[in-house]
Amino acid sequence: MANRVGETLKFLVETWYITELFRDCFFPKVNFSMPVPQVVIVGRPNVGKSSIMNWLAGKFVSVVDPTAGVTRDRVEYLFHEKERYFELVDTGGIGIVDEDNLSEHIEHQIQIGIESADLILFVVDGTAGVTALDEEVASRVRKIGVPVMLVVNKCDSTKTDLEIPQFYKLMNVPSIMTSVKANRNRKELLADILEMLPEADEDEMAEGDELSTEPELKLAIVGRRNVGKSTFINAIAQTDRMIVSEVPGTTRDSVDLRFELDEKTFVAIDTPGVRKKKSLASDIEFYSLVRAQKSIRRADVVLMFFNSQETISSVDKKLVSEIQSHYKPCIFVVNKWDLGKEAGMTPDRWTEYLQRSFSSMRHVPVAYITAKDDHNTKRVINLAQSIYKQSILRMSTGKLNKIVHGAMDANPAPMRKGRIPKIYFATQVAIQPPTIVLKVNDPEIFDTAWQRYMAGVLRETLPFKEVPIKIIYRPRTQEESEDGGS
């Protein structure tokens, strides 16, 4: 075991410069041989916790809206600041009365966040003065027994500073005045956080010895509301990480969750449930739609969820269209299959239904799971790894040309506009998706039906059977003509 770990570390160090080039900004390098300190933001509703999260991160991580109680799940962001790593965790407002009766669930997520904290940022509103709910939060935080920093937020001008001393009675802890709007004391807040973090583990790597921890793959879990996406994430991560409720639309943020399976690291992107555009009743719902679309774009594999008890809707078709337009590897996941079987459904019938509904996505594999019972959830991850590997394969130009010319000989493209379509050569120019360029005499004389034939031949003969293939017809350049097309 020790030898295997040593070989793995050696391999990672040797390939560091390659992985550094492709490292996604969402997943910075970090050594997971030690726990990453958790800096948890707490406070009553609408004091600016999510604004502070986004402000420090320098990007839109957590939904911000004047409506109290927008944040429900814990939202995490991994920082690398001055050779230290820490995870900033945004939580729901303590004391919120949720409009969907999810207060108990939100409270549970807050408690999990607080109990995992190495440092607590207790945020108050500098313009509102001390409230009874602030005092309640302070009482609760005192019991945790970890370092606390009092962050007096919304101090947009120095006039507010005169009111600050009243907050000191809440807790005798280090404090700082901040303003997201005026960009006040951001660097100072980060410096204070670093100062109050627990000392680095003695085994923490020195500068220059960092290893890339790019996950095995990033999975976007998408679907309309209440299809069981968060239940699935809790099952695969083996943790009570996401709020699970029968109330549709419980998840509002796209939440990234790292988890390990078979000694490999994955990231699951839980997205808000999407509903019809005409039903987007608020800015929050609009953010949910946009975030689902963004999650699809940055995923390696998309898990498109369906409820076995519900028919395919226009929302489902919209999401599948989004997946298809970005050429993303996808798995159709039919959840709540225990209820489907009780209703007399069979996998063959559901698969046929999906293929009729999405005829251009017949290559997409279908998985049947019951997330609440953790039934077949691991198989979905294994299948995702399999199709991801297909999406990063490269084929030699020689093999491609042999297949393409064989297809042309077996079924020549019909003459159009008085001209005979010709393919001079083929080459794969990219992965994710596998992208094949066919150099031809004129792309406009290859009819659509014949292009479908060629796509079918390539799918059947190349190892891309379950992933989208991008095929581009391009005219041969003058230089290529002079070189004989090689």
Image (cartoon, rainbow, N blue to C red):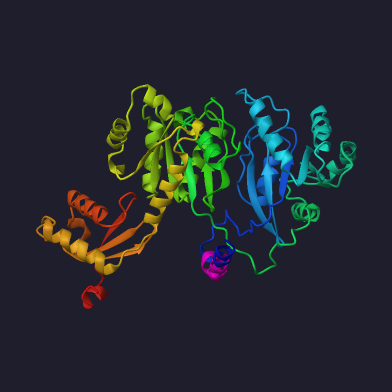
Side of 201 where 316 appears, left or right: left
Residue at horizontal 68 percent and vertical 38 percent from the top: 91
- Residue 376, x across and y down, in percent: 44, 38
Position above or below: 352 against 17: above
Rendered-image quadrant of the C terminus: bottom left
Position above or below: 484 against 442: below
- Return the residue nearer the eye: 155 or 106: 106
Is 67 one of the magenta-colored residues? no
- Return the residue nearer the eye: 348 or 319: 348
- Say whether residue 366 is visible: yes
Position above or below: 347 against 154: above
Side of 40 where 411 appears, left or right: left
Q: Quadrant of residue 308?
A: top left
- Say whether residue 475 is visible: no
> What residue span does the magenta drawing correspond to?
9-20
Is 13 one of the magenta-colored residues? yes
Q: How many numbered marks have been drawn onto this rendered protein structure?
A: 0
Residue at horizontal 14 percent and vertical 56 percent from the top: 413
- Residue 202, x across and y down, in percent: 75, 62
- Residue 257, x across and y down, in percent: 57, 45
Rendered-image quadrant of the N terminus: bottom right
Side of 243 where 464 appears, left or right: left
- Residue 477, x across and y down, in percent: 26, 70
Can you name the residue that lies furthest to the bottom here?
483
